[in-house]
Amino acid sequence: MNPFFKQKESETLELKKSTAQLKPAVISIVAILNKHQEGKLYFGVKDDGTVVGQEIGNDTLRTISQAISAYIEPKVYPVIRQVTFEGKSCIEVEFQGNEVPYFAYGRAYIRTSDEDKPLSVKELENLILRKNKDQLKWDSSICREASLEDISEEKVRSFVKEAGKEYKGLENSLKKLKLAKDGNLTNAAVILFGKKPEDFFPNAKLRCAVFATNDTSYIIDMQDYTGDLFYLIGEAEKYILKNIHIGMRLEGLKRIDVPEISKEAIREAIINAFCHRDYYEYDSVNVAVFKNRVEIRNKGLLYGGLTIEQIKTEMVSERRNELIAEIFHEIHWIEKWGRGISLILSMEPDTDFKEVGTQFIVTFKRKYFEDSEERDGEKVGEKVGEKVGETLTQNQEVILSLIRENSRISARELSDRVGISARKTEENISKLKKKGLLKRIGSARGGYWEIIEK
């Protein structure tokens, strides 16, 4: 028994003076369900919260139940009970349902504050589309083929510790993270913490490439990576930083490496790519390092009707993969306020965002790029390990990079990988030797290259 009623109408609570208002009460139930999927309604209470009581006969509760059953579609099965407020009898109707949109007397309504408004055709279409999208969310769908044996307990334990939580077993931890439902694993659980996610999802993949020019004509390097999202994000970041120019600044006597593109901006863009990509599409997240720019591409256009202009000027975000986003938020990889794009622009103001076909592309401009054609003696930047102030051409940098990867690489292979003639390759090798940066150890056939770090 509740002696006092202290509530007022809200988006989830409707008050009716009596069952004489049964038809608008049915409409209110539908409006609340379409907005919040649950709510309460009382007969015997005025809309300002004043309890007036409700006369309750033998058939009163049945009449309410029959009206709800007859005039609401899809069917709703509320709990209807007699309650007492301030010594007066009232009726409480408690209802819930997820089969939106609901209709009352053949029409759909939506709750706005404490009012019930008819839905327009366009609003109804949007409601249906939103429902279908939510039901089809990839990350919260069940991965039927996977079991707990496919999940790495070490990965989960490490994550829980980093999130500042107490680890209480694998299954319990996954449930608390909403990654398991009724003993079944979600797709998010597998792609985040699976021992080998690629066995279940061939698109749990990262593809990285370095190109010698501003287009894809000459590939210098290409690498594919598979694994969980945490691993792929780390590898993408390392790959970019390894293949762009690194400058330096001195703090006291300590050398601090300074990438030509902000490391924080790169990381934010990579996390966004994996977080917001459309995993129903068979593809990888793609990282491309060109002579003048770095591109990060992922399948999946902006979600929730957002535009490029909106994400650049407003701190808004619509999440295609809510579960994955929540996991990243737990360890502070992303924020809930949609600040990712503004953070990137604060560090790299010239960053470009665009949608091409089904791809979302983030482009960072490389600061040490020059529009003129490459000439011998042109200064294009400084890499970690190279002599401070040493002037190198793009081709010479590429040659040194390839030799770092394979000290026994042949001159012919260098020529093919760099995309220049054998004569030009030999000229560049000769100049690197004269600069004191490269030395040949042993014979041409059985020897190897040695890079001299200064």
Image (spheres, helix red, strand yellow):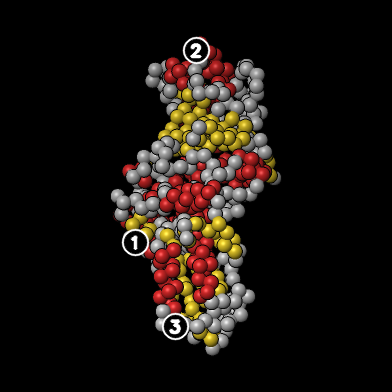
| Image-quadrant location for residue 257 | top right
Q: Position of residue 126 (x, y in %)?
A: 52, 49
Whole-Å distance between the Cαs marked 1 and 3?
43 Å
Does 94 sit above or below residue 336?
below
Q: What residue sits 57% from the left and 26% below the top?
A: 291
Q: Nearer the viewer, residue 100 or 141?
A: 100
Q: Nearer the viewer, residue 87 or 65?
A: 65
Q: What residue sits 65% from the left and 23% below the top?
A: 370
What is the secondary structure assignment of the residue under circle 1? loop
- Please name which of the two marks, 1 or 3, marks the residue nearer to the observer: 3
What is the secondary structure assignment of the residue under circle 3? loop
Q: What residue sits 42% from the left and 24% below the top?
A: 408
107 sits to left or right of 384: left
Does 268 sit above or below residue 41?
above
Q: Position of residue 234 (x, y in %)?
A: 49, 44
Q: Which residue is mark 3?
A: 57
Question: The residue under label 1 is which amino acid type?
Answer: Asp
Q: What residue sits 53% from the left and 13% below the top?
A: 424
Q: Which mark is residue 421?
A: 2
